[in-house]
Amino acid sequence: MISNSKKIIRVFYGGLAAGLVFLAGFLFFSLPSGRLELHFLNVGQGDALLIQTPEGYNILVDGGPDNAVLYELGKYLPFYNRQIDLMVLTHPHADHLAGLVEILKRHQVNKILTTGVFYGSAEYEKWLALIKEKNIPVEIANHQGIMPLGGQVHFFILFPEISLENKKIKNVNNASIVGKLIYGKSSALLSGDFEDEEELVGKVDLTAQILKAGHHGSDNANSRKFLAAVGPKYAVISVGENKYGHPNQKTVENFEALGAKILRTDQPGGINFVSDGQKFSLSPVNPYWAWLFSAP
Ligand SMILES: [Zn+2]
């Protein structure tokens, strides 16, 4: 007969061992994967993209229209990692900005990239005030050039070419940061809600394997001329329920004519890409805790 105290000791050590295995697995699978990962987040009608670099940096491009981004981020950032190494605001419309305000409060944000364009909204004022209060370094996108993101990853800023800081722009969509995320031979083109895309054709190398469809798939972006210059294999439309008719049928047809695979953030499953530096592939790898539920 085993005494009660021995039983308790066995249960204790058994539990401890199981806990350590669990913790080891948890930590192992939440380490940087050594690949570049893109997670287009489902934040409803808005944009939010989490980029995780091979060196383990977290970069967030836009934050969607509300706090939905917090839940989405929680899928990819372990609870003990609240670090956003770079926060990019393409332009200050609420469907790109609002979620970033809460992230500034809850996460440790190390750097901001923005145009600094003038925009008179309370949310924007709040976002700017929080950045100042937390003393976060701000880089103003004001010329074409490379922004290193660690290792072989960089962001090639294509627009704006001049400073828009504190300037009033009639259509703030056209104050969006446009840039190409490059890792080795693989690249993704991000353009916020930029509508003057055709003006870039012929001036800069727009080719990219992934295109985040301009302006949520609206027909005032994504023209055939522009798409032909990009030649994407994948078109990601960041969209939710909306009254604007996004994505526009013409845009969808333009992508289809090009043979691009269309992916929408409002479809189940999430949109995740990984790149080994050669090309991007769609990845079934979902949340960092998904290994818990996968077959051995
Ligand atoms: Zn938008």
Image (cartoon, grey):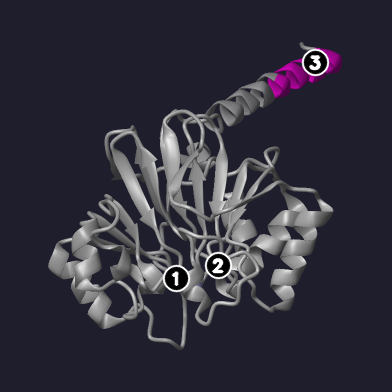
- Boundaries of the magenta span: 3-16
Residue 279 spot, x, y in % from top left: 27, 39
Q: Say if disc 1 is inside 8 Å of ligand 1.
A: yes
Mark 2 secondary-structure assignment: loop
User: Marks 3 and 2, how far apart in space?
Assistant: 59 Å
Instruction: Please identify the quarter of the rendering in which residue 104 is found.
Output: bottom right
Residue in front for this viewpoint, 86 or 76 = 86
- Classify mark 2: residues with Cα within 10 Å, few (<14), some (14-19) or many (20+): many
- Does the magenta run of residues contain 8? yes
Residue in front for this viewpoint, 44 or 2 = 44
User: Where residue 23 is drawn, which disc sits there?
Assistant: none
Residue at image mark 1:
193
Residue at image mark 3:
9
Q: Say if disc 2 is inside 8 Å of ligand 1.
A: yes
Residue in front for this viewpoint, 133 or 293 = 133
Residue 92 spot, x, y in % from top left: 60, 70
- Does the magenta run of residues contain 192? no
Residue 94 spot, x, y in % from top left: 61, 74
Lower sequence index among marks 2 and 1 = 2
Residue at 27%, 34% in the rendered image: 278
Residue type indicated by callout 1? Asp
Q: Are marks 2 and 1 in contact (CB under 8 Å)?
A: yes
Mark 1 secondary-structure assignment: loop
Q: Is residue 49 left or right of residue 187?
A: right
Lower sequence index among marks 1 and 3 = 3
Residue at image mark 2:
91
Residue type indicated by callout 2? His
Residue at 77%, 12% in the rendered image: 2
Residue at 21%, 59% in the rendered image: 229
- Residue 103 to residue 293: above or below: below
In this orientation, does residue 135 appear? yes
